Structures are given as C-alpha cells and as structure tokens.
Amino acid sequence: MRTAMRIVLVSAILLNAATCAAADKMKPGLWEMTTKSDAMKAMPKIPPEQLEKMKQMGIKMPDMQNGAMVSKVCLTKEMVDQEKPPTGGREQHCQNKSFNRSGNTYTAEMVCDSPDMKGTGIVKGSMTPDSVNSVYDFKGVSHGKPIDHHMETTGKWLGGDCGDTKPFPMPPKK
C-alpha cells in the first residue's frame, strides 16, 4: 500500500508541475511546490538523525511541514515549451491522458493500470508566470484495497537558476 501511495503522490506532483509547465505561461527555473493531503498528515515523522543519514547517502528528501510536503522542482525552458509532461520514470504505472487549457486554467487526467494499482486521477488548476494552484483527486484500487485520495498543491517561482535541483527526465520525442 505504501509503494502504491508513493506512486500516486509522486505522479500527482509531477503531473501538477508538468501540466502547469505545458501551459507555456510559467517561467522556467526553480519552483517550490507545497503539496497537502490526508495521506501525508498520517505519514510517520522521520527522526532527524535518520534524515541526516539519508542526506549523507545523497538521498534528498522533501521537507514535511504540518501534513504538507515541500519540494523543489526544476523546470527547464524545454519543459515549459513542450506540451508533453515529463514522465519522471513512472510511465510503467500511470500515464498522462487528456490535457486541456483555457486561459490560465487547466485540467488533466492520469490513468494508472498496473498489477499493483488501477485508477484515474483528475487535476484541475490555475497558473500565472510566478504561481500555480491545483487540486488532484484519485480513485482506484491498490493491492485489492480501494484508494480515494485528495491532494492540493501550490507552487511559487523562486528564480531562474535551479542550483543543484535537477530537472525530471523528459519523455522521448515522437
């Protein structure tokens, strides 16, 4: 269940960031994304000494604050210019489907169809060059158990330099 929930959470964050980037009105560079959900509120807190060990091993963990995950996302000019969201390595589990944009609002659908997880997620949001807001809902089944997941994401542009934050992999061009 935890693996499936991680896939849903990571997929949703990538889908939110990517669908916003596809709108070509966001600025490329470093973004701070804050994602809130009931699942994150229920996650156990990782002790500071364990976080430090993970950091020493090169594992970069997002900050968890009050049931929210705060992470840095790097959007390149190529990502912003492309209408196709980055896959982030999750294409074997979930695929981005319909993406629709009208002005500064957008909707997108994510469909998961793997032995571990099946379901559909819908994201609705709005963006400006410096900010993004979205709501994501996923319904499906993971390892035979129902999932009904709600998540809200806000993002703000921090600047044009991504520093040591690496962009997500881009899908192959067709």
Image: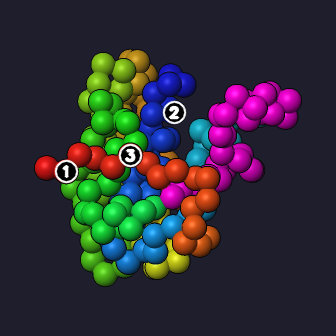
- Does residue 54 belong to the magenta stretch? yes
Place residue 50 in its image quadrant: top right
* Local SS, label 1: loop
Which mark is nearer the camera, 1 or 2? 1
Spatial CA span between label 1 and label 2: 27 Å
Q: Earlier in the sequence, mark 1 or mark 2?
A: 2
What residue is disc 3 on?
169
Residue 64 location in percent, x, y? 71, 46
Q: In the rendered view, tell whether residue 23 sits above or below residue 118.
A: below
Stretch of the chain drawn in magenta: 46-74
Local packing at callout 2 (Cα closer than 10 Å; few below 14, some 14-19, many 20+) is: few
* Residue 131 forms part of the magenta stretch: no
Q: Which residue is mark 2?
A: 6
Q: Position of residue 113 (x, y in %)?
A: 26, 30
Q: Earlier in the sequence, mark 3 or mark 2?
A: 2
Question: Residue 171: percent from the left, percent from the top?
Answer: 28, 47
Left or right of 81: which side holds 13?
right
Q: Please give the label number shown on residue 173.
A: 1
Residue 152 can be seen in this image: no
Left or right, 165 with respect to 108, comes to right
**Cα gap from disc 3 to disc 2, whole angstroms:** 18 Å
Label 1 and label 3: CA atoms lie apart by 12 Å
Decide if residue 61 is in sight here: yes
Residue at 85% from the left image edge and 34% from the top image edge: 48
Name above or below for residue 62 compared with residue 136. Answer: above
User: Image quarter for residue 125?
Assistant: bottom left
The answer to whether residue 15 is above or below residue 103 is: above
